């Protein structure tokens, strides 16, 4: 069965490229770029101690603290290219055919790294992934919900961001970072303006936050997908609505365990979603922070917990293709 899962042409819709920064890459880039790592946290003694610390996240915010420190090591175009290339190589090994990748421009621009530096690096890796690995990919620009909404608007309206969206280098927007106390509706204007530009829209909701945030992401942000959404099972009426509308959830099982949203993959409402006709894809989220578990490890973990049939897996992959944001020609190839 694992071999069957490896061979399935998979679409990944929920991967933060900054979350593919391994402790080894983090340390080598920090050294090259003369970036000081925190001296008061023993986790930063070595890649090994950092890896050990990653096994012990208490919640989403505990993880995010490390995630934002980690990405400070990324400085030039070559760093961003190396980061994304490292991800694409893992993706190829795992049988990914198409990847839609999140990135967090605000976390780079705020520390003086230009948006075009980030984008050039990612674009170079995407081009190489297409040519050498046959992986198609797209970029989704995420806004950080723990920062004031006017800062997200300012980022969206900035000229390099607008250029990347009008050229098609970036095809959609997302909303990530701390969820509790940062409801989706705070970002309604950002989503209205992005939609007016013709962008696709998604948002993290129902990861740590309540099912109600899934409803407001749909109603106020008018998103076409929901990232995580595992708490949807707490609201059967909303679950029926999502099933009827065929809104894709991008589920990240191992992430949910690492960040203590659930105690095990078996606790996730995978069977409930299948029974209710809720469409979802299985994804890695931040593989370098969650035990080096890329997409195939997530497929395997779901298989171990739920013993799905090949038919059910084929259905999950088909839903993923349908919910992808590539052009119709590529979709037909993937089918
Ligand atoms: C994230 Cl797992 C998760 N949740 C919310 N925001 C994020 N950014 C990167 N990983
Ligand atoms: Zn995520």
Image (cartoon, grey):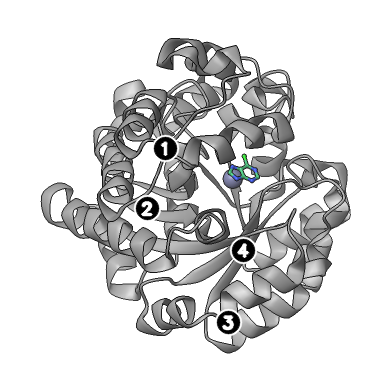
Give the labeled residue for mark 4.
Answer: 202
Disc 1/disc 3 C-alpha distance (Å): 27 Å
- Residue at (58% x, 76% y) in the render: 156
Q: Are marks 2 and 3 in contact (CB under 8 Å)?
A: no
Decide if residue 147 is on the left or right side of residue 248: right
Please indicate whether residue 220 sits to the left or right of residue 113 in the image.
right
Q: Look at mark 3 in the image and give the residue it sits on.
A: 157
The answer to whether 148 is drawn above or below residue 63 in the figure is below
Q: Quadrant of the C terminus?
A: bottom left
Residue at the (48%, 13%) spot, across then down = 45
Whichever of callouts 2 and 3 sits on the residue coming sooner in the sequence is 2
SS under mark 2:
strand
Give the secondary structure at mark 4.
Answer: strand
Queried on whether the Cβ of the residue with tag 1 lies below 8 angstroms from ligand 1, the answer reads: no
Q: Nearer the viewer, residue 332 or 330?
A: 330
Farthest residue to the left: give it: 132
In the drawing, what numbered circle is on residue 316? none
Query: Of callouts 2 and 4, which one flags the residue occurring earlier in the amino acid sequence?
Result: 2
- Secondary structure under the numbered disc 1 in the rendered image: helix
- Disc 3 or disc 4, which is closer to the eye? 3
State which tag comes first along the sequence, 1 or 4: 1
- Residue 20, disc: 1
Q: Determine whether label 2 and label 4 are within 8 Å by CB.
A: no
């Amino acid at each position: 069965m694992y071999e069957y899962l490896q061979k399935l042409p998979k679409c990944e819709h929920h991967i933060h490229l900054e979350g593919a920064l391994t402790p080894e890459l983090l340390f080598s880039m920090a050294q090259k770029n003369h970036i000081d790592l925190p001296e008061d946290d023993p986790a930063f003694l070595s890649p090994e101690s950092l890896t050990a610390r990653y096994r012990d996240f208490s919640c989403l915010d505990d993880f995010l603290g490390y995630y934002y420190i980690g990405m400070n090591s990324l400085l030039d175009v070559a760093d961003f290219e190396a980061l994304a290339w490292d991800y694409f190589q893992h993706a190829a090994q795992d049988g990914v055919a198409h990847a839609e990748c999140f990135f967090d421009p605000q976390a780079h621009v705020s520390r003086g790294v230009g948006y075009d530096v980030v984008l050039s690096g990612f674009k170079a890796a995407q081009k190489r992934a297409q040519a050498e690995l046959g992986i198609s990919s797209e970029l989704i620009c995420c806004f950080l919900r723990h920062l004031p909404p006017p800062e997200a608007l300012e980022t969206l309206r900035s000229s390099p961001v607008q250029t990347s969206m009008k050229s098609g280098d970036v095809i959609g927007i997302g909303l990530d970072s701390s969820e509790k106390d940062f409801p989706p509706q705070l970002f309604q204007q950002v989503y209205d303006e992005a939609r007016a530009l013709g962008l696709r829209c998604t948002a993290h909701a129902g990861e740590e936050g309540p099912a109600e945030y899934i409803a407001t992401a749909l109603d106020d942000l008018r998103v076409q997908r929901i990232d995580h959404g595992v708490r949807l099972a707490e609201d059967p009426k909303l679950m029926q609505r999502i099933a009827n509308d065929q809104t894709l959830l991008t589920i990240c099982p191992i992430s949910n365990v690492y960040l203590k949203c659930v105690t095990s993959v078996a606790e996730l409402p995978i069977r409930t979603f299948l029974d209710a006709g809720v469409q979802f894809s299985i994804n890695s989220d931040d593989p370098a922070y969650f035990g080096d578990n890329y997409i195939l490890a997530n497929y395997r973990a779901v298989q171990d917990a739920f013993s799905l049939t090949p038919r059910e897996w084929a259905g999950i992959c088909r839903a993923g293709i349908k919910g992808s944001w590539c052009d119709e020609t590529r979709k037909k190839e993937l089918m």
